[in-house]
Each structure stands twice: as structure tokens, then as C-alpha cells.
Amino acid sequence: MGGRCRIQTGRLQLDPVSWGDLEDVVRLKSSATVTGRLAGGVCNRILSERDMMTDLMTWGREGVGMFTVRHQGRFIGLAGVQPSTMSPDCHELHFAIFPHEHQTGLSCQATSMALAFAHEGGVRRAISYVRENDIVGRRVLGSAGMSVCDSQPDSCGPDILLYQSVRPAGENPRLH
């Protein structure tokens, strides 16, 4: 699966997560400065392993999922989609890039590529949650082509914004 799902640009390489990435993922997910953008928040090793198993099963079942993101061969984060726990008709876009990489715009590029791959793979609607005051997160989601939803669900809370990207029905229907 890895080779045909690899996304390569002049600056970045995205590959589906694999068990070989576990140590990097554990380090990323245990960092409080990073994991606010991942659904599970700060994770210990056991939770990271459980998340990894879910990510691997999603790739196997749906052909889309979370990517590791590397810059010049060095692991810098994760970006990709997971089935939504809130809405069965969509996927959630998540990204987590080590903070020192934000100023280069790599997080924008990685998230854009992961979202485009998901849509090409048949994901019709992708959503993402971000705090209203998270300027970096909002910039990344906007750069990826997502927009703030007109109506915010009550479950979001007053300081949480719901972003979405919708591909019209009938375009690239590989999933489901």
C-alpha cells in the first residue's frame, strides 16, 4: 500500500502510517505543544499504539487515512483523515506538525495534499474542528481549501469552529 499511496513533492514526502513510524508518532503525540490539533489530545505510548491500529485499519478498509509527513527525510508530523465519530457521512481531517515547522508553511502543504488525496479517494465531505483563537490552525485549514461552516453544531462549544470541505456527489466515488 505504501508505494501507491505515497505523495512526493520537492519539499515533502507523505506516506501512510506504518508500525515502523511508531516511535516518531509516540514522540509527536506525547508533545503538549503539538497534539492539540489531533482528536485524542496528548497521548501516552499505549494510546498512540491504539491510534496507530485504528489508522492502519482505516487505510486497509477505506484506502485513505493518516500520513506521516517527512521533510528532507526527517519526520515532522502527521496529516490525514479518519472516519468521523460525530457524523457517519464524513471524515475528520487532522494534522499535527512540530511547531518549529509552522513558519515554513509545511503544515499547510501537507494538510492540503492529505485532503486532496482523501477527496480523490472518495471522501465526499471532510470536517475539522479548530479553536477560534487558533490562528495557525485556521490558516492551515483555509489553505487546504476548507471553509467555516455556516451553521455551527451545538456540540462544538462557543470557541470551536467547524470547517468543512465538500466534493460534489459523483466525483471520484471510490469509497463506500
Image (cartoon, helix red, strand yellow):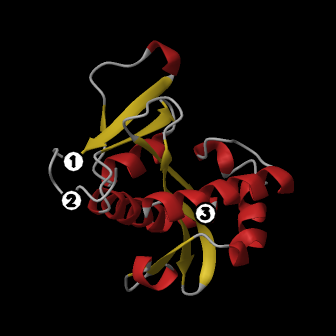
Residue 156 image offset from top left, x and y in percent? 50, 21
Identify the residue at image location x=44%, y=30%. Answer: 87
Q: Closer to the camera: disc 3 or disc 1?
A: 3
The answer to whether 13 is drawn above or below residue 122 in the figure is: below
Whether the residues at callouts 1 and 2 have beta carbons within 8 Å, the answer is: yes
- Closer-to-camera residue (82/163): 82
Identify the residue at image location x=75%, y=53%. Answer: 50
Q: Closer to the camera: disc 1 or disc 2?
A: 2
Q: Which residue is mark 3?
A: 56
Question: Residue flagged by tag 2: what amino acid is it?
Answer: Asn
Identify the residue at image location x=16%, y=45%. Answer: 168
Whether the residues at callouts 3 and 1 have beta carbons within 8 Å, the answer is: no
The reply to whether residue 102 is in sight is: no
The disc label shown at residue 167, or none? 1
Residue 71 image offset from top left, x and y in percent? 53, 80
Answer with left or right where residue 44 lies relative to residue 176.
right
- Which element is circle 3 on? helix
Answer with left or right where residue 20 lies relative to residue 93.
right
Sequence-first tag of 3 and 1: 3
Q: Which residue is mark 2?
A: 172
Q: CA distance from mark 3 to mark 1?
A: 24 Å
